[in-house]
Amino acid sequence: MAPLPQVIVENLAKTYRIAKRRTGFLGALGGIARREYHLVRALTGVSFELEPGELVGYIGPNGAGKSTTIKILSGILVPDSGRCQILGKVPWRERAAYVGQIGVVFGQRSQLWWDLPVVDSFDLLRDIYRVPPARYGQSKDTLVQALGLAPLLDVPVRQLSLGQRMRCELAASLLHAPRLLFLDEPTIGLDAVSKLAVRDFIRELNRQRELTVILTTHDMDDIEALCHRVMVIGRGSILFDGTLDRLRASVSPERRLIIEVPPELPLPELALPAARVVKREGEQVHISFDPRVVRPAQLIGELSASLPLRDLYVVNPPIEEIIAKLYGVFDL
Amino acid sequence: MKPYLSVLRIRSLVLLQYRMAAFAGMCTQILFGWVRVMILEGFYTSSTALQPMSYAQAVTYIWLGQAMLRMLPWDGDLEIQAMIRKGDLAYELCRPLGLYEHWFARAIALRTAPTLIRALPVFAFAFFLLPGPYRMQPPPGWLEMGAWVLTSVGALLLSAAITNIINISMLWTISGEGVLRLLPALVLIFSGMIVPLPLLPEWSQAVLRFLPFSGLVDTPSRFYLGHLPVSQLPGYLGTQLAWTGLLVALGRWLLHRGMKRVVVQGG
């Protein structure tokens, strides 16, 4: 393995030129004669590096440039400027040689042949990626076992549920043993059980095969469950790059204390200025506090003195709120 | 080569699943063939002038065309069209394959699989089940048969090259409506599908000979009939292959230009 980072991205920029559609009948008529264009700056300067075996979450609001980055990194789009070197290659310049070494899952699209049994699509991919038969058999068996696909292989893709299909899509992207895997919203639309199955699989894969994974998602539980490192993109550039804990700390140091009290009981005014009630749901009362100002013991002491507490626990605020706050800070 | 053969194979598998469409198409082809043969009969019996092709030859020419109808490049690959519209093209682009060759393999499948399942029943019907004057005749000899097979392969390659241009044109129009309305008319008339080309006016023959479309139906059919002597095979096969080469080059150029415009939108 080369001593250099596996993925080097420097100052990627991409601007789309989009034809303006005027509204109404006259507008449409005018559009035939003269097209106006406006420019959408999707990426303004994205830079990062990845080491082999990293599992990084790539998040950002809709339209922030996540998919554009993934498309450039997977060789589908050519950027306007910037440098990109992945596995020693420039994706869009050596496309055919490069894409043989990566795997891609687009959660909103399908790479399986709709009308045919799953295994037919797998066999086609074997030939497309020129995987030697012995290695293919081995790799297929491992994936079928890890993802529980055995009963699905002979079923036409159109008869699969979304969760079943997504497990098959994951397997399809890994049959050729790529060194780098792009997952673009792999858990979108999945039920809880399928989400957990997909997450477990990705975690194992990253650990056992030392596979580098870039995961984009809107589901913050995915990030929390899988990613040590998070990159946040907004308005075309990277706003944050670091661990999830640091992201939390940088946006808001707040902690949550959840106490359980009889539902009708009136709550006393809190004497501590840095703590406040944010939510009351049945028996549960959520109290937000800043651990740098109020020690948890102090807060609990005060509460237990005035209230008949049934139970209590301290948690981090949901990652969704953190991210929403972060987007708010940057006015996205 | 293997990846492309595998694409051809899997696309054929899908196409072979549409059995009802094949059956309905086959019935239409037989009906239309029969109508055309009867119209020809009307013309031949009402004219005393010597025609450039005998009635029996013209009947066989019509049946050959009907049996091989699905080989004509008058539509594109609906799956590619859907892929471009929905953005699944993204997956096609991250395969270690040449996109032109990938789609060419699909085009070959599109032009052969449906033809294979329909041609045999149409041939059986036209050879054995029709009354005498409407019946199809076998080729005069093995040489003619061989020339027919070779020029049919030439026609297939030519047809796939045109089909691929239709596929690639979807990158601009998305729905493909425009091309798909214009092209069938050109293909049907200039290939010999409507009226056998030798029956068209004398002055048009030289032009028809060198248009790409005559290579689709007219050339194979006339070698089958012995209407063109086998000695002219190299020239006609050469025309088919030259057009194929030219259209492949055009298709590649269009695809290269089209890919610069492609932006796969949305998540």
Image: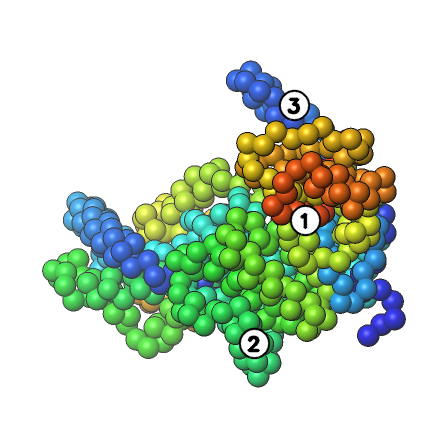
* Amino acid on which disc 2 is placed: Thr
Query: In the rendered structure, which disc, 3 or 2, sits on the residue that comes first in sequence?
Result: 3
Query: In the rendered structure, which disc, 3 or 1, sits on the residue that comes first in sequence?
Result: 3
Q: Distance from label 3 to label 1 (Cα)?
A: 64 Å
Chain letter for mark 1, please: A
> According to the image, label 2 marks what residue?
A142
Q: Distance from label 3 to label 2 (Cα)?
A: 57 Å
Residue A68: x, y in percent?
Answer: 70, 46
Classify mark 3: helix, strand or loop: loop
* Amino acid on which disc 1 is placed: Tyr
Looking at the image, which residue is at 38% across and 46% down?
B189
Q: Distance from label 1 to label 2 (Cα)?
A: 41 Å
Respond whether the residues carrying marks 3 and 1 are from the same subunit. Answer: yes
A207 lies left or right of B136: right
The answer to whether marks 3 and 2 mark residues whose Cβ atoms lie closer than 8 Å is: no
Looking at the image, which residue is at 56% across and 49% down?
A188
> Is any part of residue B116 visible from this angle?
yes
* Amino acid on which disc 3 is placed: Arg
Instruction: Looking at this view, name the residue that lies furthest to the right.
Output: A3
Chain letter for mark 2, please: A
B203 lies left or right of A236: left
Looking at the image, which residue is at 64% across and 53% down?
A222
> According to the image, label 3 marks what residue?
A34
Q: Could you say which is closer to the camera, residue A292 or residue A111?
A: A292
> According to the image, label 1 marks what residue?
A313
Residue A244: x, y in percent?
Answer: 77, 52
Looking at the image, which residue is at 84% across and 64% down?
A5
Instruction: Looking at this view, name the residue that lies furthest to the left.
Output: B131
